Amino acid sequence: MKTYQRIYNLVKKIPKGRVATYGQIGQMLDLNPRVIGWALNRLAKYKPNYSRANHVSVRTIPWQRVINSKGSISTNKLMNIPLGLQKKLLEKEGIKFNKEEKINLKKYLWKSLS
């Protein structure tokens, strides 16, 4: 299985209302955390192709559930994702941000079985 597909398959397992870090996903897949970021950033560039069964896009992968190890979102630096979108999506799932715009990892971090 290709590297990005392995990443997408794992990210799909993060439950609603939980987050994982780039480092956590990287450790689970024995990959550099930057590769996780590159794979998720690439999702925003995909043109949906609904004829493929294993289609991946921002609509099918919960990319918003992956954050940095400080509990912050990193997508505000990307030009292909609207400012504040990741925060808005996480808040819709019930995740709360503190005054410093960080997520409490002790409360919301996904504790996978892997």
Image: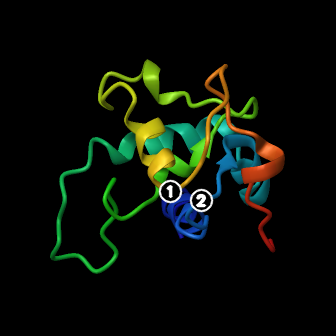
Q: Amino acid at mark 1?
A: Glu
Residue bearing the label numbered 1: 93
Label 1 crowd (10 A; few <14 / some 14-19 / many >=20): some
Residue toward you, 95 or 55: 95
The answer to whether residue 9 is left or right of residue 108 is left
The answer to whether residue 1 is left or right of residue 25 is left
Q: Quadrant of the C terminus?
A: bottom right
Tell me whether circle 1 and circle 2 mark residues in contact (CB < 8 Å): yes
The dot on residue 41 is none
Q: What residue is at 57 percent from the left and 64 percent from the top?
A: 6
Mark 1 element type: loop
Quadrant in the rendering for residue 70: top right
Residue toward you, 14 or 46: 14
Q: How many marks?
A: 2
What is the CA distance from the residue labelled 1 to the residue labelled 2?
5 Å
Q: What residue is at 26 percent from the left and 49 percent from the top?
A: 46
Looking at the image, residue 9 lies above or below residue 73: below
Earlier-in-chain disc, 1 versus 2: 2
The answer to whether residue 106 is left or right of residue 8 is right
Residue bearing the label numbered 2: 17
Q: Quadrant of the N terminus?
A: bottom right
Q: Amino acid at mark 2?
A: Gly
Label 2 crowd (10 A; few <14 / some 14-19 / many >=20): some
Q: Position of residue 59 (x, y in %)?
A: 31, 59
Q: What residue is at 42 percent from the left and 47 percent from the top?
A: 89
Q: Position of residue 23 (x, y in %)?
A: 74, 42
Mark 2 element type: loop
